[in-house]
Image (cartoon, rainbow, N blue to C red):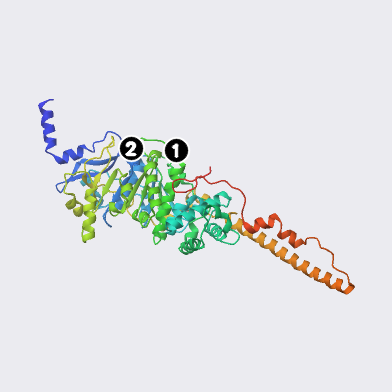
Amino acid sequence: MSESTDAAAAADRTDPAGQIAAGYAFTGPALDLGALVWDGACLPDRQIRIPLAMLNRHGLVAGATGTGKTKTLQLIAEQLSANGVPVFLADIKGDVSGITAPGTPGERIDERARDVAQSWEPTGYPGEFYSLGGIGPGVPVRSTVTAFGPVLMSKVLQLNQTQEQSLGLIFHYADTKGLELIDLKDLRAVVAFLVSDQGKAELKGIGGLSTVTAGVILRALTAFETQGATEFFGEPEFDTSELLRTAADGRGVVSVLELPAVQDKPQLFSTFLMWLLADLYNDLPEVGDLDKPKLVFFFDEAHLLFSGASKAFLQSVTQTVRLIRSKGVGVFFVTQTPKDVPADVLAQLGNRVQHALRAFTPDDAKALKATVKTFPHSAYDLEELLTGLGTGEAVVTVLSENGAPTPVAATRLRAPQSLMGPIAAADLEQAVKASLLWSRYAEPVDRESAYEKISAEQAAAEAQAEAAAAAAEAEKQAKAAEKEAARATGRGAPQADPSLAEQVVGSGLFRSLARSIGTQLGREISRSIFGTARRRR
């Protein structure tokens, strides 16, 4: 080794900033996050990046309100799109739609660009706007109750473990009897039937359904419907492969789910996002490690997903996140502190962008200490650093190209090149109506399913019973007339053949109708980790 090389190595060992920057000197394609900050100074020649191939190893974007998490999502999403990777974003507050429009130049943008050595150009990216069930602007995204599955439905209905198991039994029965659960009235009809006099015997051999549990489920469904959830379940069901599209110019389409209209129903939209992810997991083939992901999915307000979740639900989330990596999908959870995410899920998140945390209360201080412990060993005083970061700054550690964690780096982030705010409502509406998907998903369809089948068979059974009752009454009157005639003539009444009513009541058809409605044979629907149904192509 030459003297100059030895000198450079020695200098590098005494230069912590150089050592940190060396950990981000990747050879393959990478996304540029910003410039290293060391000892209070921003170093534009020392760039902090994420390898494109590591984006399917999942990540976490965390920080207190107002610290720049949304702009970080926008920055990463822009570069993914530019590299041909489709992106899914949940727009909780309605301020992400601007990603489809070029940004607005200004003094603050110019200053940030100079600080981080960014060549900033206003750029819009190809986008598609969606809404849950058509509430708010966007192409309606709907799921059938069957596809949603019992585990996710239990989460959104806030059922306990026993009630969740009973709901699973109800789905099982509907599957085996060919009763399609398309919307909420289908589920309500099946639950009501299984605790009726006619339906009680149907589940007796496999545990049955108690009237009390059925009552809890029905009341939860009623509360769910009053929140507007009726709109979210039905057909045409959204095909999640729509999220994997690229534009004609090769850039990835940014799918923005507009949620401001339902932001007062956090448990609903967070669970619905989990359905989207679970459905993708069901449908995508195994691909292993790719040069770039097939899709990167940003899960905003992630703490809402895990709030009050059952053990079965948490296990399902953990398993889905762990396994979907090999299908080419990356998942980024966005929340306020890492402790909002269960430890088993957090352990699978290889990329971290941590914005500033506040320490105003004892609970805040405790959360800060817990967050520091989740980082690798660092040359920074992280407790001090995390409370002193400015807006648009973050602490970063990612997975390098060989899968090892990079050094912890305080980073001044680049500015997004698209509009940092919402586009005009008229422009959003125009973009939605111009979408090729609008004609495919806009109009709801209500075809025959469990509700209609059960109602029809109940009506048939009631009509049969009424006919039998009328026939019995007619027979009774005929017998009375015969007896009266016999007394008048002095003759005894002859032995009568079985009456029409007796024949009807004693028939196998009537007994079958009285015992069970909807007895047609169907096949059990194959279900995934979450109990969601596999899509039939």
The residue nearer to you, when weighing 273 against 195, is: 195
- Where is 11 relative to 161, above or below? above
Q: Nearer the viewer, residue 209 or 254?
A: 209
Amino acid found under the numbered disc labelled 1: Pro
The quadrant holding residue 271 is bottom left
Q: Quadrant of the N terminus?
A: top left
Q: Where residue 204 sits: x, y (%)?
A: 55, 55
Residue 345 left/right relative to 248: left
Judged from the image, the secondary structure of the residue bearing numbered disc 2 is helix
* Residues marked 2 and 1 touching at CB (< 8 Å): no
- Residue beneath disc 1: 285
Of the numbered discs in the image, which one, if any, rests on residue 53?
2
Judged left or right of residue 424, residue 12 is left
- In percent of width and height, residue 250 lies at 40, 39
**Label whose residue precedes the other's in the sequence (2 or 1):** 2
Q: Is residue 147 left or right of residue 449?
A: left
Q: Which mark is residue 99?
A: none
Farthest residue to the bottom: give it: 488
Provide residue 113's location: percent of width, then percent of height: 24, 47
Q: Residues within 10 Å of mark 2 (few under 14, many from 20)?
A: some
Q: Secondary structure at mark 1?
A: loop
Q: Amino acid at mark 2?
A: Ala
> How far separated are the C-alphas under marks 2 and 1?
18 Å
